[in-house]
Amino acid sequence: MKNAIIITGVSTGIGFELAKQFAQKGYQVLGSVRKLEDAGLLMDQYPDNFLPLVFDVTDHKAIDTAVDEVKQLLKGESLVGLINNAGIAVTGTVYDLEMEEYKHQFDVNFFGLIKVTQAFLPLLGAEVGFNGKPGRILNISSAAGQIGFPFMSPYCSSKHAVEGFSESLRRELMHLGIKVIIIGPTAIKTPIWEKGDVELPEQVKNGAFGKQAGNFLKLFSKSGEKGMPANTFAKKVVGIFEKSKPKSRYSISANAFEEWLLPRYLPSEAVDKSIAKILNRE
């Protein structure tokens, strides 16, 4: 099995599109799903280029089992890449969120990503005596990895952590030739926006932050609806993965000026004022 790449969280959304685009380009995609049935469509569409790996990124024993499975599939070959995509978004007010919700956010988005990376590093080239071509690691972060948004503190915190981890990892692996690349998209249009099921918890809706959180959710939903299509995003990621000299970080956005450049590079006080106006609208 050559040109094998691992992508986590391929059952829906961005991960699903990434798996499709890499399979169409001829890669052997090993995609993680939590249940085998979640991989049915990809297995049907790409029987020669897609194989599921059944594990949850919070289940470290299952990840170790998947490594053994991948070694058997590779038969001495190495991985060309690992894309850490699996993630969730826990939202709410700091006042209302339970500590367990913060822990769950980090277990999936951060500690799960670290465990998967550690587990597959030897197959990417971090092993004594490795004589193949070093693989690449793409960590899917977010604009929220460098910008803080209200009512998204668990998610923003976890993505800031991913970016810090990725920076350190890149500099640790430089001498091995393993490149680590951060992908930081803004809004991506996925089925979650079409379902209309993104709602505030009752305790937030009826609490001291109800109006502000409701206004933010409207803005957030509108942003998602206008976001970059997931398949377009996935094609861009394939292009980045195949660059001979990739940058260390890429921001990908359909509306870069509004969603990335202004909030990232304007003075914080100016951004705060703009957000305050939005949150306090009647």
Image (cartoon, grey):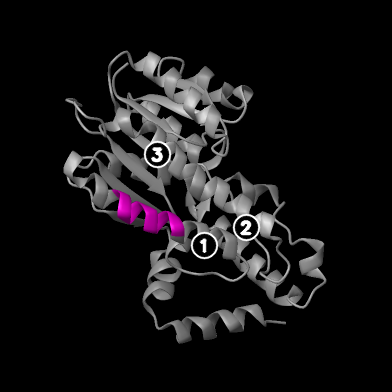
Q: CA distance from mark 2 to mark 1?
A: 9 Å
Q: Nearer the viewer, residue 245 or 215?
A: 245
The residue wearing badge 2 is 102
Whether the residues at callouts 3 and 1 have beta carbons within 8 Å, the answer is no
Quadrant, the N terminus: top left
Determine the secondary structure under disc 3. Answer: helix
Residue 157: mark:
1
**Helix, strand or loop at mark 2:** helix
What amino acid type is highlighted by mark number 1? Ser
Magenta-tinted stretch: 161-169
Q: Mark 2 belongs to which amino acid?
A: Tyr
What's the mark number on residue 117?
Answer: 3
Q: Considering only vertical position in the picture, is 91 above or below 177?
A: below
Labelled pair 2, 1 in contact (Cβ < 8 Å): yes
Question: Is 165 left or right of 103, judged from the image as shown?
Answer: left
Return the residue found at the far front: 128
Residue 259 picture quarter: bottom left
Q: Residues within 10 Å of mark 3 (few under 14, many from 20)?
A: some
